Amino acid sequence: QKEVEQNSGPLSVPEGAIASLNCTYSDRVSQSFFWYRQYSGKSPELIMSIYSNGDKEDGRFTAQLNKASQYVSLLIRDSQPSDSATYLCAVVTGANNLFFGTGTRLTVIP
Amino acid sequence: GAGVSQSPRYKVTKRGQDVALRCDPISGHVSLYWYRQALGQGPEFLTYFNYEAQQDKSGLPNDRFSAERPEGSISTLTIQRTEQRDSAMYRCASSTRNEQFFGPGTRLTVL
């Protein structure tokens, strides 16, 4: 079982819609969770971090964490073509290592 | 301020040669991480340092790979006797707490 699982996509949404990206993780004692955005040919860029159950909002982005279900998600409201990228979920495990999922490729259609 | 920098950005080498990849972290960042990323995959952990101490090297694929950070700042990832399967993007990240910030990466091609 992989440490972090994501649907590889591609996920396509029309401009202005809500994009929903999902991630599950296997280590129950994980405490820190991150979403990175990676444009093609570029480095991963940190866009959200979340440490507590519930929602955390930052502009058009909302991260949601449910530790009981070992599930973390990212919602992007009012999606823009510039949001088209691969979104990587990353989790710090109990051994203090950061594991990444394979990423979900998002395409926002104008 | 300056972000994480890596050099060289591209490295082409022949099988059997040694290569050294450099990472210069964000000033003041305690932790430094090395990852390898294959196309279409997320970054794969290799090793990390707190200050000059290597905390975990469990992700290094084999003993041809080594890393050091002698003064707690710049780090070097060395691959000895390179093989074609070592071709990948090698990424470095630094952090002061939990949030890691990535450098531009070094694209290694082994012919």
Image (cartoon, coloured by chain):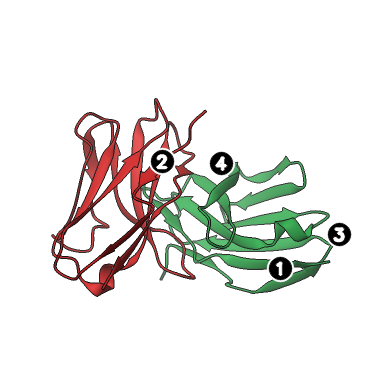
Chain colours: A green, B red
Residue of label 2: B5
Which residue is drawn at the image coordinates 72% and 48% (left, top)? A61
Q: Is residue A70 visible?
A: no
Is B15 left, or right, of A81 in this rendering? left
Vertical order, A24 against B8 (above or below): below
Question: Of callouts 4 and 3, which one flags the residue occurring earlier in the amino acid sequence?
Answer: 3
Q: Residues within 10 Å of mark 3 (few under 14, many from 20)?
A: some
Q: Position of residue B99 (x, y in %)?
A: 49, 39
Task: Give the number of the mark in front: 4 or 3.
Answer: 3
Camera-side residue of B5 and B44: B5
Spatial CA distance of label 4 from label 3 is 28 Å
The chain under label 1 reads A
Q: Quadrant of residue A48?
A: top right
Q: Pick the quarter of the image with the N terminus of chain A.
A: bottom left
Question: Of callouts 4 and 1, which one flags the residue occurring earlier in the amino acid sequence?
Answer: 4
Residue of label 3: A16
Is A67 left, or right, of B64 in this rendering? right
Using the rendered image, report if marks 3 and 1 lie on a common chain.
Answer: yes
Q: Amino acid at mark 3?
A: Gly
Spatial CA distance of label 1 from label 2 is 29 Å
Which residue is drawn at the image coordinates 36% and 49% (left, top)? A97
Q: Amino acid at mark 4?
A: Tyr
Find numbered disc 4 in the image and state the secondary structure of the residue it sits on.
Answer: loop
Residue of label 4: A51
